[in-house]
Amino acid sequence: MPKSRQSQVSLEDTPYYHCVTRCVRRAFLCGEDKATGKSYEHRRQWVEDKLLSLAQVFCIDICAYAVMSNHTHVVLHVDAKEAMALSELAVLERWHSLHKGTLLTRRYADSDERKEMSGAEIITTKEIIEVYRSRLYDISWFMRHLNEYIAREANKEDGCTGRFWEGRFKSQALLDEAALAACMAYVDLNPIRAKMAETPETSNHTSVQQRAQAAKVKKAQPKSLFRFVGNPRKRMPQGLPFRLVDYLALVDETGRQIRQGKRGHIAQSQSPILKRLNIEPENWLTLTTEFEDRFSYAAGDSQHMRQYRQNTHHRRLRGMQCAVKLFG
C-alpha cells in the first residue's frame, strides 16, 4: 500500500530526495511515437525550463535531473533554513509569482494598502504567509507545479483532456553521501543506459550536460544547479559535499563500464570519491544501474536507514538488506 508523502519526507534525516514521475500508458512526455511517427522532443525543453524556473521560486535546489521519453528524474535539496529566513514580503513575492494569492495577501504586499489594514486582517494575513512559507520548501508543492504545468501543456497540444501522469510522483530519501552520489550518477546516466546519448556531455536536457558545458566553457558551475563545494570540512559552505571534477570523472568512468557491459571491477584508476565514500566498485555499478529497484522510500547505509524508519514510523522499510550489502 502506498505510503503518505508525509511519512516519506523527513527533513530531520536528510534534505536530499530523488523524485520520479512517469506518464500514463501510451502517453508521450518526449521522444518519438513509433506508431504514428510524431515527435515530442520539444517537450523536453518545457520540462527543463519549468524545472529550473521553479528552483528560483522555491527554497529547493536542483542537484541532478534527466528528462526521458516517458518519465523524469530529479534529485532535490530542500533548504528549509532559507525558507525560514525569508521576510514576509519575500515569501509573498515568491508565492505571488506563481499564484494570485488572496485579497488580504495582495493588500499586504502593497505598502500603501497595508497601512489601511485592520489588526485582525494583518493577523490573518501573517497566518496565510506562514502557510505559503511552508509550501516553499515542500517537495510535493514543487512537483505539483512542475507536473500540472507539463500535463496542461501536453493535453493542450494533443487536443485532449484527462490523466497525463500515472499518479503521484515517487520519492526516495537519500540518507547519506554515498546514497546521494549513487543516485545522482544513476539519474545522470539514464540517457546513456537508454542509448539516447553516447557520453554524459552529449546527453541533452540533463544536469550533467549543464555542469560539463559550464566547466569546459566558463570554467565555472551553472547558477541554476546546486553547487559542488568539495569534501566535507569545518565551516562547510552550502552545496554538494563532493568536488565537481571528481563527480564528472566518476560519472564518465561509470558510464563507460555500463556502456561496454562490464559489470565487474572498475579500472584501477578509481575516482577519489569512491575511496572517500567507501563503496566497492562492484557495489557502485549495482547502485548506478539498479537504484530504483534496490530501494523504495529511502536509501543509505543501514544505520541511517534504521534512523529514518524510526523517525517516519515505518514498520518495515524495503532495501534494508541492500543497504547492509551495498553501503555497509
Image: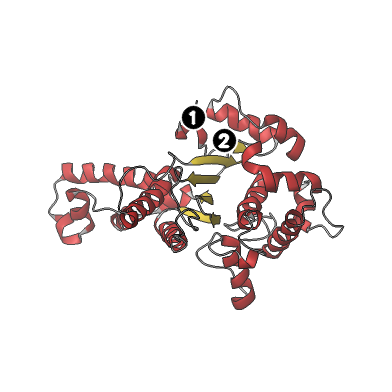
Disc 2 is placed on an element classified as: loop
Q: Which percent across, then down, holds residue 121?
A: 17, 44
* Figure quadrant of residue 230: bottom right
Q: Which percent across, then down, holds residue 59?
A: 44, 53
Q: Residue at horizontal 47%, vertical 41%?
A: 169
Label 2: how many Cα within 10 Å (few below 14, some 14–19, many 20+)? many
Marking on residue 297: 2
Q: Residue at horizontal 57%, vertical 38%?
A: 13
* Figure quadrant of residue 209: bottom right
Q: Which percent across, then down, holds residue 175?
A: 62, 41
Q: Are marks 1 and 2 in contact (CB under 8 Å)?
A: yes
Q: Which residue is mark 1?
A: 3
Which residue reaches farthest bottom? 217
Label 1: how many Cα within 10 Å (few below 14, some 14–19, many 20+)? few
Disc 1 is placed on an element classified as: loop
**Quarter of the C terminus within the rendering:** top right
Which residue reaches farthest top? 315
Can residue 119 be seen at all in this image of the molecule? yes
